[in-house]
């Protein structure tokens, strides 16, 4: 046995791993005679996973996430395919059926429910409630998703700049955030929305169907960017002194590279959670504004206005209120439950 083999076995015994197999003759470094390289084999039962794969694994094991996610997929697909649903259903959102109402404006039968009208007929107007709900989902989700994307984008940019630059920039941005959070949202909406409508349209002009939804998106962005900005700022304050940021700074990387190539990839988990919890809050706010008469108005279908129209008939046709209210409740609940499950799945300390 050569001196190399003896030294190898002594080192193995000292390390507690047992004797080392003898090195083949003529190959001092232990490489097989054919020149092939032996790959390292991981222990049985051990599979390396990235943080994203671990989060997806936890999410798949969460039954609440699976159920709430399935409900969300159903609502989103139903809203996205609203024109196709209307074509297959045979009724449009503005189509009326006065023959299904009595002379007092109430639906014939029990709330007008039949094989042709699954959820019944809207009292007084004569529209099909099912197709109103489908297009109402489309309006609410479109406004909420658009506002949430713009809100997150603006909040992330402002928050990451404030947290990294610091100094007077951080002080000014923090002061603006505190001011926006203290501002009364609904009072501002009551004052601003009619003023904006009167600024662009006269008292006899017909307001474009896109104007009020776009106005609501603008208001939501102005008020809700502060939540994501404050969250991102706090995360950046704890990341800006880390080794990888110091290394990028020492290598001469520019400000944009450090902010969006070094810091931003480490912020996706809180950003996704904030987005998933921001959408249901925006859906509720949009429905509340439409319910109060300062959001989406006729002729655009909307869940909040549908509930408002049903209040006057709640005693005679309670199903009208139940349908709109239950749809809005299930939509917001599914988003909140999925957001909570997503937050747990992205938490590296989670044991699931």
Image (spheres, grey):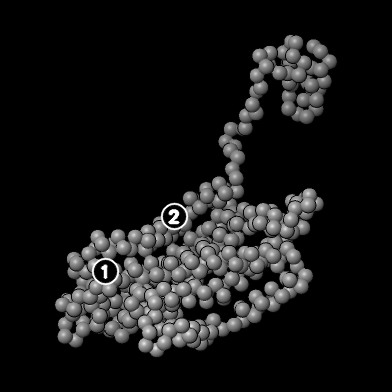
In this rendering, position of residue 17 left or right of residue 57: right
Between 197 and 97, the one lying in front of the other is 197
Disc 1, SS? loop
Instruction: Classify 63 as above or below 44.
Output: below
Q: Which mark is residue 66?
A: 2
Between 290 and 336, the one lying in front of the other is 290
Q: Quadrant of the N terminus?
A: top right
| CA gap, disc 2 and disc 1 | 33 Å
How many marks the image carries: the answer is: 2
Question: Local crowd at mark 2 within 10 Å, few (<14), some, or many (≥20)?
Answer: some
Give x and y (percent) for residue 74: 37, 59
Residue at 72% of width from left, 13% of height from top?
24
Q: State the residue lying farthest toward the bottom.
A: 203
Quarter of the view holding residue 91: bottom left
Q: Nearer the viewer, mark 2 or mark 1?
A: 1
Q: Which mark is residue 92?
A: 1
In this rendering, position of residue 338 left or right of residue 160: left
Residue at 77% of width from left, 70% of height from top?
167
Instruction: Classify 260 as above or below 176.
Output: above
Residue at 80% of width from left, 52% of height from top?
250
Between 63 and 217, the one lying in front of the other is 217
| Lower sequence index among marks 2 and 1 | 2
Disc 2, SS? helix
Q: Which mark is residue 118?
A: none
Give x and y (percent) for residue 166: 75, 67
Residue 110 visible in the displayed image:
no
Residue at 56% of width from left, 68% of height from top?
151
Between 239 and 343, the one lying in front of the other is 239
Quarter of the view holding residue 179: bottom right
């Amino acid at each position: 046995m050569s001196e190399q083999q003896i030294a190898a076995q002594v080192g193995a015994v000292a390390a507690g791993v047992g004797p080392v197999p003898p090195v083949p003759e003529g190959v001092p470094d232990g490489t097989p005679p054919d020149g092939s390289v032996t790959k390292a084999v991981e222990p049985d039962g051990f599979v390396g996973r990235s943080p994203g794969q671990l989060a997806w694994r936890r999410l798949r094991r969460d039954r609440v996430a699976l159920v709430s996610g399935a409900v969300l997929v159903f609502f989103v697909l139903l809203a996205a395919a609203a024109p196709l649903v209307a074509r297959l259903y045979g009724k449009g959102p503005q189509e009326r059926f006065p023959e299904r109402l009595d002379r007092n404006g109430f639906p014939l039968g029990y709330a007008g429910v039949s094989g042709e009208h699954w959820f019944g007929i809207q009292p007084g107007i004569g529209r099909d409630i099912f197709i109103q709900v489908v297009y109402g989902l489309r309006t609410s989700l479109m406004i909420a998703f658009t506002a949430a994307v713009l809100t997150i984008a603006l909040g992330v940019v402002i928050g990451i700049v404030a947290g990294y630059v610091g100094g007077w920039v951080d002080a000014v941005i923090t002061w603006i955030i505190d001011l926006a959070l203290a501002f009364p949202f609904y009072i501002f909406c009551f004052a601003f929305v009619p003023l904006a409508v009167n600024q662009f349209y006269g008292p006899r002009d017909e307001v474009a169907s896109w104007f009020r939804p776009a106005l609501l998106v603008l208001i939501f962005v102005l008020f809700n960017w502060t939540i994501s900005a404050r969250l991102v700022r706090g995360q950046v304050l704890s990341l800006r002194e880390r080794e990888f940021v110091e290394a990028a700074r020492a290598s001469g990387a520019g400000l944009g590279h450090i902010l969006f190539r070094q810091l931003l990839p480490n912020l996706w988990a809180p950003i996704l959670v904030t987005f998933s919890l921001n959408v249901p809050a925006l859906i509720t706010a949009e429905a509340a504004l439409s319910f109060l008469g300062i959001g989406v108005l006729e002729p655009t279908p909307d869940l909040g206005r549908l509930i408002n129209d049903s209040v006057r008939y709640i005693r005679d046709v309670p199903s009208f209120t139940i349908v709109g209210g239950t749809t809005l409740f299930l939509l917001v609940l599914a988003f909140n439950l999925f957001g909570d499950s997503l937050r747990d799945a992205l938490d590296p300390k989670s044991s699931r």
